[in-house]
Image: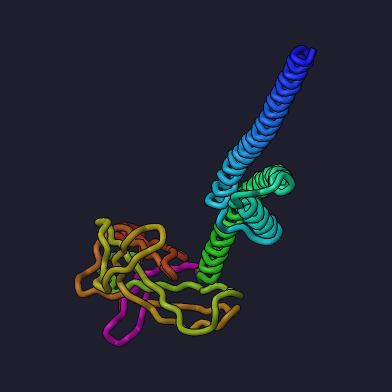
Amino acid sequence: MSNETSNNGSKISIVVLVIALIGSWIYFVNTNNTKTEIITNYTTEVAVLDSTKNSIQADFIAASAKVDSLNQENTGLQGELQGKAVAIQKLKMNISNILRKKEATDKELGEAKSMISELNGKVNNLLADLGKAQEENKQLNAQNQELTTQNSTLSSNLNTTKKEKERLQDIGSTLHASTFTIQAIRVKSNGSERATETAKRANLIRLAFMIDKNKITPSGTQELYVCITGPDGKAIGDGGNFNTREDGARSYANKLSVVYEQNVALPVSYDFKQSNKFTEGEYKVEVYHNGFKIGEGKTALKKSIEKGQIENVD
């Protein structure tokens, strides 16, 4: 009876011990599972955090590239556009400060992500403003080019008008001769004169004309060039050469200096003599002023007096 009781107690003790061991094992297993779960959760959170930061970092790099490109292409921004560019740089710096932190919080990363979106928006707005400004500049440049062309045309027209005015002024100030008379004259030894038509009796040709009134020509000395062409078509006289406006260079027999009074008619007389005898044929006399021919006249000398004609000879 006593041995049976002892065996039963031993069995009970063994059962209790087994139960205790099983409980301890269960507790140990549960504790390890909890720790593993905590570690796993933490690792997952860190991985998610790193992934989020990397994603934000990638977005920031892309946004920064747009900002840098914008700055390189537009270094001379002014006014409102410059203010927008400064705000973009400031926002970029704030984002960079957050991402440089080794242990940035979820809140900070969220702020960085939000600021990156804002940064992209500001960059896009500035790009749109720049595009609009460039288009306006193109229009202004086109308008300026058109104005420049118009000014050039206007300037050219003004120059043309000025030159035309000067030309007309030049022409208007040129004197005009009228009532031309050309006579062959025989001057006798006693000084008396008589008109003649024969070449052998003539010893001078007298030119007479009237300078008409001119309101433009100023008062003062005016130079007149007298050109005489003989019957052989050659110029007579050795006064020299001068340039005309329409007939090129001409040889002149004499240069006359007349004192002209503005808007007053002036009679002019000129006698041409030559060492050689005059020959029969036509003599042509032309008068130039200011390079323009202002009048001309002709006279013809005969070889001898025709039958039935009488010329007084003293």
Query: Would you place residue 265 above or below residue 234 in this image?
Result: below
Residue 281: which quarter of the image? bottom left
Which contiguous range is marked in magenta?
177-195
Q: Nearer the viewer, residue 140 or 173?
A: 140
Q: Nearer the viewer, residue 39 or 71?
A: 39
* Number of numbered discs visible in the structure rendering: 0
Residue 51: x and y in percent read: 62, 35
Residue 279: which quarter of the image? bottom left
User: Which residue is rendered at x = 37% and y = 58% of the image?
Assistant: 247
For the N terminus, the quadrant is top right
Residue 308: which quarter of the image? bottom left
Task: Kindly report the secondary structure that dominates the magenta region of the rendered protein.
Answer: strand
User: Which residue is rendered at x = 69% and y = 34% of the image?
Assistant: 38
- Residue 128 showing in the rendered view: no
Q: Residue furthest bottom?
A: 190
Tell me if residue 68 is in the magenta stretch: no
Q: Is residue 15 left or right of residue 275?
A: right
User: Which residue is rendered at x = 53% and y = 79% of the image?
Assistant: 266
For the C terminus, the quadrant is bottom left
Residue 305: x and y in percent read: 30, 61
Q: How is the image coloured?
A: rainbow
User: Which residue is rendered at x = 55% and y = 46% of the image?
Assistant: 69
Q: Nearer the viewer, residue 171 or 40?
A: 40
Query: Would you place residue 13 above or below residue 180 in this image?
Result: above
